Image: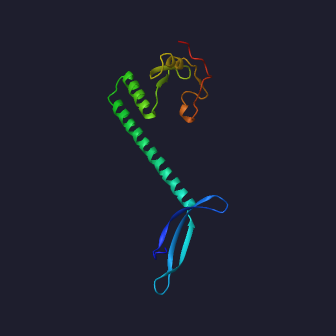
């Protein structure tokens, strides 16, 4: 500014109470009739919150972009699953396609499909992937306790009550 040019920029300053702030400063020279610098006029504005909000917005946009990418990957996995299901005619082929597709979509390490054998009485294990050999049959052996008739399971989100915890069979 003493050279006769305007200066502007952001400066980190310490407030008299000790906390730090980010301040936007714009200084302009005051010139006499001969063009010599005789003073400086300046404006300072605290931009700490503005920069913090911009950083928060950037983080949110980045997180949203990651969620979008993840959703796009899951949609692609579902499309792959749909393509695998179209030619499947046998139950074993359908179960395999659903298990493999479900693992991919959910990024899970293991999955199983339990079917109701007789409405309201028992499960039948249709297939599983990724579980230790003793785990999947243990799930199929768990008792089923319904609080709605089997013909109405879609009327509530909790159509089937989870069974009481039971120990898995030993190796």
- Left or right of 92, for residue 39: right
Image vertical order of residue 84 relative to residue 35, above or below: above
Q: In which quarter of the image is residue 130?
A: top left
**What colour scheme governs how the chains and residues are painted in the rendered image of this protein?**
rainbow
Residue 117 shows in this picture: no
| Residue nearer the viewer, 149 or 3 | 3
What residue appears at the point 50 percent right and 77 percent down from the top-left corner?
29
Q: Is residue 131 above or below residue 40?
A: above
Q: Is residue 15 visible?
A: yes
Q: How many labels does the image show?
A: 0
Residue 116 point in image, percent of width and height: 51, 23
Using the image as rendered, state which of residue 33 and residue 171 is in the foreground: 33
Please, which residue is most extreme toward the right here? 17
- 18 vs 82: above or below: below
Residue farthest left in this picture: 87
Give how far across and how far down residue 52 sits, in percent: 55, 56
Of 12 and 86, the residue lying toward us: 12
Considering every residue shown, the one lying at the far bottom of the view is 33
Question: Could you say where residue 71 lies in the image, as x and y percent from the top left?
Answer: 43, 42
Spot occupied by residue 47 in the image (x, y as percentages of width and height): 55, 63
Which residue is depicted at the point 61% across and 28% down? 147
Query: Is residue 102 found left or right of 155 in the rendered image?
Result: left
Q: Which of 139 and 103 is in front in this view?
A: 103
Q: Is residue 33 above or below residue 73?
A: below
Q: Residue at x 41, y 32 (%)?
A: 104
Q: Residue at x 46, y 27 (%)?
A: 109
């Amino acid at each position: 500014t003493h050279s006769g040019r305007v200066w502007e920029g952001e400066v980190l300053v310490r407030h008299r109470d000790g906390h730090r702030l980010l301040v936007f400063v714009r200084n302009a020279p005051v010139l006499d009739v001969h063009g010599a610098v005789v003073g400086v006029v300046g404006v300072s504005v605290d931009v700490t919150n503005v920069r913090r909000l911009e950083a928060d917005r950037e983080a949110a946009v980045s997180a949203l972009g990651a969620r979008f990418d993840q959703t796009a990957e899951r949609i692609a996995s579902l499309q792959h699953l749909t393509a695998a299901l179209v030619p499947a005619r046998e139950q074993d082929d359908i179960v395999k396609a659903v298990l493999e597709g479900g693992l991919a979509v959910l990024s899970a390490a293991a999955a199983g499909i339990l079917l109701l054998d007789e409405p309201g009485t028992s499960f039948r294990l249709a297939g599983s992937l990724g579980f230790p050999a003793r785990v999947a049959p243990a799930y199929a052996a768990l008792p089923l306790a319904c609080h709605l008739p089997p013909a109405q399971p879609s009327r509530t989100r909790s159509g089937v009550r989870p069974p009481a915890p039971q120990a898995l069979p030993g190796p």
